[in-house]
Image: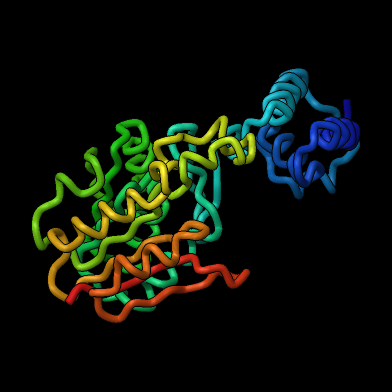
């Protein structure tokens, strides 16, 4: 089977299974099977696949058709221009979360000690450490996620200390200048309405924020008063519909800011401890 034929057949299979952007997905999966970049296909369309490449490609197509996200198949996802390893133990980093990085760089670039709460893949922690040079800590309740975050930081050359704990319970009082978090914010009542790829494959501990979706925001805001130094910043990603609740949470904080994403949807909340 040639590269061209493999891509055509893969695209047809994925399209029939209702997978979005089937041609791009087929190219990414074939590139993963052949250990090459997608651009290679355009110069070598008539090249025959090796048997092992064909076998792996077929398995990847089958997994994707059954709902497994492409990133969990390739174990890779780009975030803020850097490549992160992702496994089913961590949430797949989204482009929207890059707005958290941009907000931090706008309001708290000079922070000396940063804490990323619920770090998952470590995308925020590693990125902020590399962008600011600050002493950076990251926490996660999942040991498996903490191991992924530590591995990503090490591969990227970011100095991040990762601790396993529930939110900030292991962090000292008045020890941080900045707390960032992309907390679980999907209400449990919306579970069945999620895409299959999200509902059935991404870790529920990183998705669901309790019955209302606000529970983790409440806990983070409450403990931030203990962990932040005076004048420290709290920056959190906002889930859809969370703005009114978080606005009320931050009403006693200084300089509250609510940053929209490219679609105009409120995406980041930032405020300074008085």
Q: Position of residue 134 (x, y in %)?
A: 25, 65
Q: Can you tell which quarter of the image residue 57 is in?
A: top right
Q: Can you tell which quarter of the image residue 268 is in?
A: bottom left
Near-viewer residue (182 or 73)? 182
Near-viewer residue (92 or 28)? 92
Residue drawn at (84%, 30%) of the image? 13
* Apparent side of residue 6 relative to residue 116 in the rendered image (left or right): right
Q: Position of residue 211 (x, y in %)?
A: 41, 42
Residue drawn at (16%, 45%) of the image? 169
Q: Position of residue 56 (x, y in %)?
A: 69, 23
Near-viewer residue (83 or 180)? 180
The N terminus sits in image quarter: top right
Look at the image and name its color scheme. Answer: rainbow
* Apparent side of residue 71 relative to residue 204 in the rendered image (left or right): right
* Apparent side of residue 112 relative to residue 130 in the rendered image (left or right): left
57 is higher (above) or lower (below) than 227: above
Q: Position of residue 80 (x, y in %)?
A: 50, 61
Determine the residue located farthest toward the left in the rendered image: 173
Total marks drawn? 0
68 is higher (above) or lower (below) than 113: above
The C terminus sits in image quarter: bottom left
Residue drawn at (36%, 43%) of the image? 149
Is residue 211 shown to the viewer in this render?
yes
């Amino acid at each position: 089977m040639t590269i061209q034929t493999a891509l055509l057949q893969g695209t047809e299979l994925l399209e029939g299974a209702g997978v979005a952007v089937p041609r791009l997905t087929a190219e990414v999966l074939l590139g993963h099977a052949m250990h090459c970049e997608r651009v290679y296909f355009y110069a070598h369309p008539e090249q025959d696949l090796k048997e092992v490449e064909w076998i792996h490609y077929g398995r990847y197509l089958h997994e994707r058709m059954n709902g497994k996200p492409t990133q969990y198949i390739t174990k890779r996802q780009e975030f803020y221009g850097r490549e992160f390893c992702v496994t089913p133990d961590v949430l797949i980093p989204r482009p929207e979360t890059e707005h958290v990085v941009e907000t931090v760089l706008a309001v708290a670039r000079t922070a000396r000690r940063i804490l990323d709460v619920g770090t998952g893949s470590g995308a925020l922690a590693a990125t902020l450490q590399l962008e600011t040079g600050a002493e950076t800590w990251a926490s996660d309740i999942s040991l498996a996620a903490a191991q992924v975050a530590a591995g990503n930081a090490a591969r990227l050359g970011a100095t991040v200390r990762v601790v396993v704990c529930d939110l900030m319970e292991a962090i000292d009082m008045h020890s941080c200048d900045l707390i960032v978090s992309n907390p679980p914010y999907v209400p449990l009542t919306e579970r069945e309405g999620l895409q299959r790829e999200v509902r059935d494959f991404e870790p529920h501990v990183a998705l669901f924020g309790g019955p209302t979706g606000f529970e983790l925001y409440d806990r983070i805001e409450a403990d931030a008063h203990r962990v932040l130094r005076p004048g420290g910043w709290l920056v959190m990603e906002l889930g859809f519909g969370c703005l009114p609740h978080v606005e009320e949470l931050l009403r006693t904080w200084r300089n509250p800011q609510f940053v929209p994403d490219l679609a105009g949807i409120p995406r980041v909340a930032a405020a300074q401890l008085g």
